[in-house]
Image (cartoon, rainbow, N blue to C red):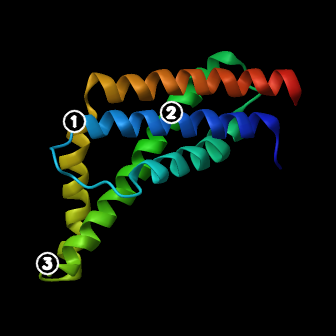
């Protein structure tokens, strides 16, 4: 059921995903084309904020901190899965795989390769601070309006 706390969580985690995605772009090599990367990051953040954080409000501020950071981690997991799958499909259309199993395994290899780039102060800071603020904001909205 739609509530204000779910809406606030969706907006705050959409913003968190946007800033984390932009911080991630800073560590990528020059000349990469991103296309709809930022829009997809925001969409993943909104969905995770609504479904994960929004569902767990009303349990206190301490739980909200943990759930907010967990929501940020879930955003990273879904984003890595989505973007690495897109990269794999692009490689598959260029005939770089011998079979479907090799393509599926490469999704996880790509996730490890790009996952190492996540461990910068900018990206982790955006995710942790955004998760904490998103959790507190959603909990505050739950206590205030729901």
Mark 2 or mark 1, which has the lower sequence index? 2
Q: Which residue position is annotated with label 2?
A: 16
Q: What element carries label 3?
A: loop
Compared with 20, 66 (above or below) is above
Which residue is drawn at the image coordinates 62% and 26% (left, top)? 135
Which residue is drawn at the image coordinates 63% and 16% (left, top)? 62
Q: What element carries label 1?
A: loop
Q: In this view, does 117 lie to the left or right of 75?
A: left
Which residue is drawn at the image coordinates 33% and 33% (left, top)? 23
- The circle on residue 27 is 1
**Horizontal and vertical percent for residue 6?**
73, 39
Q: Which residue lies furthest to the front in this view?
A: 31
As measured in the structure, the alpha-carbon distance from the residue carrying label 3 to the one carrying label 2 is 35 Å
**Horizontal and vertical percent for residue 44?**
52, 50
Marks 2,1: beta carbons within 8 A: no
Compared with 43, 94 (above or below) is below
Camera-nearest label, 3 or 1: 1
Count of labels shown? 3
Q: Check disc 3: other Cα within 10 Å, few if <14, some if 14-19, many if 20+.
A: some
Locate residue 118: give its quadrant: top left
**Horizontal and vertical percent for residue 119?**
26, 30
Locate residue 26: give its quadrant: top left
Q: Check disc 1: other Cα within 10 Å, few if <14, some if 14-19, many if 20+.
A: few
As measured in the structure, the alpha-carbon distance from the residue carrying label 3 to the one carrying label 1 is 27 Å
Mark 3 or mark 1, which has the lower sequence index? 1
As measured in the structure, the alpha-carbon distance from the residue carrying label 2 to the one carrying label 1 is 17 Å
Q: Which residue position is annotated with label 3?
A: 97
Mark 3 or mark 2, which has the lower sequence index? 2
């Amino acid at each position: 059921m739609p509530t204000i706390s779910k809406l606030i969580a969706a907006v705050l985690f959409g913003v968190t995903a946007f800033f984390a995605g932009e911080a991630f772009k800073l560590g990528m090599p020059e000349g990469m084309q991103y296309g709809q990367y930022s829009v997809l990051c925001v969409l993943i953040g909104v969905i995770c904020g609504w479904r994960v954080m929004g569902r767990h409000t009303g349990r206190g501020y301490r739980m909200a901190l943990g759930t907010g950071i967990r929501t940020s981690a879930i955003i990273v997991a879904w984003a890595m899965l989505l973007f690495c799958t897109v990269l794999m499909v692009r490689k598959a259309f260029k005939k770089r795989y011998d079979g479907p199993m090799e393509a599926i395994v490469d999704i996880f290899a790509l996730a490890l390769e790009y996952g190492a780039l996540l461990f910068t102060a900018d990206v982790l800071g955006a995710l942790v601070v955004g998760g904490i603020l998103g959790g507190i904001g959603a909990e505050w909205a739950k206590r205030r309006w729901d």
